[in-house]
Image (cartoon, rainbow, N blue to C red):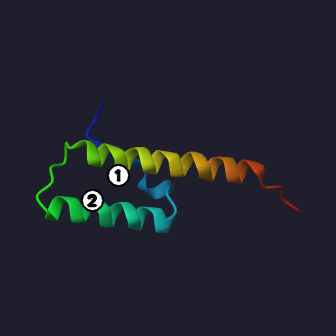
Amino acid sequence: MENPLREIEKIAHQLPLVALQDINKRITDWLSGGGKEDHPYIEQQLRFARNVLKSEERLNGNRQIG
């Protein structure tokens, strides 16, 4: 797997703002506390981001226009 932070950067523009802000806060806190970029916690944030995208896709797919 590529660097999880880079993966998050690639999909960040697709995430709802509130989700992106949450991920950013968690990662910033983690890194400022001495955590490393390659720790599984960062991978967990990537999984969360991907799950948000899947959820958004399902919601958008179930909406009917008009």
Q: In which quarter of the view is residue 34 placed? A: bottom left
N-term mark: 1 or 2: 1
Q: Report the front residue among 10 and 50.
A: 50
Q: In which quarter of the view is residue 24 placed? A: bottom left
Q: Position of residue 33 (x, y in %)?
A: 14, 63
Residue at point 46%, 57% (across, down): 13
Q: Position of residue 59 (x, y in %)?
A: 69, 53
Q: Is residue 6 left or right of residue 62?
A: left
Q: Which residue is mark 1?
A: 9
Between the C-alphas of marks 1 and 2, the distance is: 12 Å
Can you name the residue that lies furthest to the top here?
1
Q: How many marks?
A: 2
Could you classify mark 1 by the number of other residues whose Cα lies within 10 Å: few (under 14), some (14-19), or many (20 or more)?
few
Q: Which residue is mark 2?
A: 27
Can you name the residue that lies furthest to the left here?
34
Q: Is residue 22 left or right of residue 6?
A: right
Q: Secondary structure at mark 1?
A: helix
Q: Is residue 27 above or below residue 55?
A: below
Q: In which quarter of the view is residue 64 placed? A: bottom right
Q: Quadrant of the C terminus?
A: bottom right
Q: Is residue 50 left or right of residue 42?
A: right
Q: Secondary structure at mark 2?
A: helix
Which of pointers 1 and 2 indicates the residue nearer the eye? 2
Q: Is residue 7 above or below residue 22?
A: above
Contact check, label 1 and label 2, Cβ < 8 Å = no
Q: Amino acid at mark 1?
A: Glu
Q: Position of residue 22 (x, y in %)?
A: 39, 65
Residue at point 24%, 64% (across, down): 28
Q: Amino acid at mark 2?
A: Ile
Residue at point 30%, 31% (across, down): 1
Q: Which mark is residue 63?
A: none
Could you classify mark 2 by the number of other residues whose Cα lies within 10 Å: few (under 14), some (14-19), or many (20 or more)?
some
